[in-house]
Amino acid sequence: MNEQAIKDLLYKLADDQLILGHRNSEWTGFGPILEEDIAFSSMAQDKIGHSLAFYTLLQEFGEADPDTVAFTRNANQFHSSQLVELPNGEYDFSLIRHFLYDNAEFIRFEMLAQSSYEPIAKVATKLKGEVKYHVLHANTWIKNLGSSTEEAILRLQSSLNEALPYALGMFEKSKYEQELIDTGVYAGEEAVKAEWLKRIQAVIEKTELKLPDLESTAPKYGGRYGDHTEHLQPLLDEMAEVFKIDPTAEW
Amino acid sequence: MYGGGNVFEATKFDTLQNEDPAKLAEFEARIARGEKIEPTDWMPELYRKQLIRMIEQHAHSEIIGALPEGTWITRAPGFRRKMAQMAKVQDEVGHAQLLYSAAETLGKSREQMLTDLINGKSKYSNVFNYPAFTWADSNIISWLIDAGAIVNQLANAKGSYGPYCRALDRICAEEAFHLKYGHDAVVHMATGSPKQREMIQAALNRWWTPIMHFFGPPDKMSTHTEILMRWKVKMASNDDMRQQFLDMYVPKIWELGLTVPDPNLKKNPETGKWDYTEPDWEEFKRVINGDGPCNAERLAVRRTAEERGAWVRRALLHPKAKYVKPLA
């Protein structure tokens, strides 16, 4: 088994969950209703917990400990998609991103639960139950708000148009893609994307929203290879502000 | 997190003259017997008014209290602290949710309470008008402000209004974890590197006055509380709660090698009570009336959150909004 291929996969999973978890946590105290503050915080805690689980697996491959890996790397060392690093914006954007991201993430976890690489399969099996609730949360809100006021529908539609190219960027292939597929470690991004489209379309059809034409939407790639928007480095600087006062200290 | 540093409305005893004397006597007898008053039970208007005021202030304190600590969620050092800080602040928002529900049983809607908060009509714990400059400030809040809140809330949990008491029971159980979390974080700082020790001592120095303020003005300065204590709305005097807090936590602070910035603080062997320098109560009044370091910022943040989220609440109330079974 190619160690580099598995490490690449683990970094992608861990970094996505860490960065989106961090963004979700920024809603604490600012939600449109208290229940949403609480929901986004719960998802943030789950996601950051998931990233920790994947960084812990990486440590077994000789990578540094999870705190060092998460709190001291620079943006160009992150394998997360650009979708997760975008600022929260208004609630409509955060909700749409959450919907697009978690539907894909759940499929990834379902597939990884079948992985031939047992440590990943174990973690994915254990954690996918949590991601399932994130999907239920997102789908419930999209269905609810997506057929309510004109204002809400317009806002969601505009955020959907804005987020979709970044969402497609999630499926950027790894340079080890074929190898991961051939060895049964991971079903690959094409497979995730095909299933994702079916699932998000099924939800969107129940609303007054419209999925933009995919053929004419260019995916925002680069994140998986360390190419990020200007938003990631400031997020990382903020995250490490206290940690870097003394990285050897116990906080 | 909430202390006794709230302000009760001056009780106008003549308002009681409009109440049915027989019902009032029965109401007071029930409370004296230790019974709980429930939402549909008869109660004097003054009782209802004071309780709404108190529970509402408590709920506001929870959501405003989420702000100074919330700013450190994104900066918490390391996974362990990051996850705990998130969970801790989330709990505070959850407490607000519980408390707004408890207050709603008395006839005031959550939306109205939040409107009164951002209009400056209703108050919240004074302590949150101070900034959390560093990570260490956030640790001091988690430990000592939560500790103070527990002293206050354990007392209030024995009060007379059923829904509030039940909310407080649940809240106190969670606050007990916050206290452990805060203590653990402070221990790491106080026993850590010189820089960490310096940070935590500086934070304690900054927070000592707000902590002393937390329990409210000295008893000799607070009037009108007799009837509230008889009705078990207010359960312990401000000075008693402050003494209880000092008794429990000053030794723990000293044990960590930290100093308290009050040269007069000591336990008086004759009275068995703590002697201390009265904190500046003029400052307390100034801050509670809006002139603290963060009053404007806290309310502005809350106002922005309310305004930015208004479209969501409008959409939820829209007749076209489909009810979606949450787990479907």
Image (spheres, coloured by chain):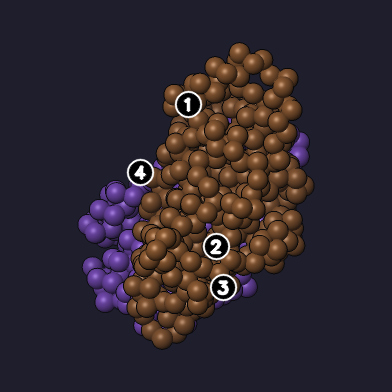
The numbered mark 4 sits on a residue in which chain? A
User: How many residues crowd around disc 1 within 10 Å: few (fewer than 14), some, or many (20 or more)?
Assistant: some
Residue marked by disc 3:
B206
The numbered mark 2 sits on a residue in which chain? B
The numbered mark 3 sits on a residue in which chain? B
Instruction: From the viewer's side, name the closer residue of B222 and A38.
Output: B222
Instruction: From the viewer's side, name the closer residue of A53 and B226.
Output: B226
Q: Nearer the viewer, mark 1 or mark 2?
A: 1
Pointer 4 with pointer 1, Cβ within 8 A: no
Please give the label number shown on residue A129: 4
Q: Nearer the viewer, mark 4 or mark 1?
A: 1
Residue A187 vs B211, above or below: the answer is: above
Instruction: From the viewer's side, name the closer residue of A26 and B21.
Output: B21
Label 2: which secondary element: helix
Please give the label number shown on residue B212: 2
User: How many residues crowd around disc 4 within 10 Å: few (fewer than 14), some, or many (20 or more)?
Assistant: few
Q: Residue at x 55, y 40 (%)?
A: B234
- Answer yes or no: are tags 1 and 2 on the same subunit: yes
Q: Residue at x 57, y 18 (%)?
A: B25
Pointer 4 with pointer 2, Cβ within 8 A: no
- Answer yes or no: are tags 2 and 3 on the same subunit: yes
Q: Is residue B324 visible?
A: yes
Question: Spatial distance from mark 3 to mark 4, Cα to Cα?
Answer: 44 Å
Q: Earlier in the sequence, mark 1 or mark 3?
A: 1
Question: Spatial distance from mark 4 to mark 1, Cα to Cα?
Answer: 50 Å
What kind of residue is marked 2?
Answer: Met
Apparent side of residue A131 relative to residue A221 in the rendered image (left or right): left
What kind of residue is marked 4?
Answer: Gly
Residue B40 vs A181, above or below: the answer is: above
Label 4: which secondary element: helix
**Colour chain B appears in:** brown
Shown in purple, the chain is A
